[in-house]
Image: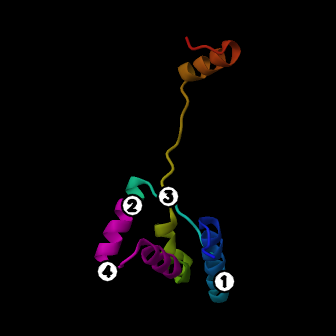
Amino acid sequence: MAKDNAQIQRDKRAKEKALLDRIGAEKRTLIVSKALADALQVLGERHDFEEWQETVSTFLLNLAAAPAEESARFASMSRPEIVVTEKQSRQLEAFAKTGTEG
């Protein structure tokens, strides 16, 4: 008897899980912005990586193996400071009271 699509998918997931268990790995996904996709493309081309997963894995392993003082510059992320002006503060307070702008 032929397998239905649901059974084929269950078998595929079970096979993948068995492989991951055997090699001690887990499957993860990554949401990729345009900037991140571009960076992965540049690094892949620059260092001859064939797949983005290879790029990410190699850089993470090397970054983790480096001394903290060497890896720190690659681990810092710019976080813009958000400053609320007095006018914006008043507008927010008014909106909180009335539920409308202006």
Does 34 appear in magenta? no
Task: Give the number of the mark in front: 4 or 3.
Answer: 4
Of mark 4 and mark 3, the one earlier in the sequence is: 4
- Where in the figure is residue 32, as x and y percent of width and height? 46, 58
- Where in the figure is residue 93, as x and y percent of width and height? 65, 19
Residue beneath disc 4 = 48
Q: Which mark is residue 37?
A: 2
- Where in the figure is residue 65, as x and y percent of width and height? 54, 83
Residue beneath disc 3 = 77
Residue farthest toward the left in the current orientation of the protein: 46
Check disc 3 and give the amino acid type. Met
Task: Give the number of the mark in front: 4 or 1.
Answer: 1
Who's the residue at 59% across and 66% down the image?
Answer: 5
Who's the residue at 61% across and 13% down the image?
Answer: 100
> On the picture, is 52 further left or further right than 96?
left
Of mark 3 and mark 2, the one earlier in the sequence is: 2
Task: Give the number of the mark in front: 3 or 1.
Answer: 1
Does 40 appear in magenta? yes
Which region of the structure is painted magenta? Answer: 38-62
SS category of the residue bearing label 2: helix
Q: Pointer 4 and pointer 3: residues touching (CB < 8 Å)?
A: no
Of mark 4 and mark 1, the one earlier in the sequence is: 1
Of mark 3 and mark 1, the one earlier in the sequence is: 1
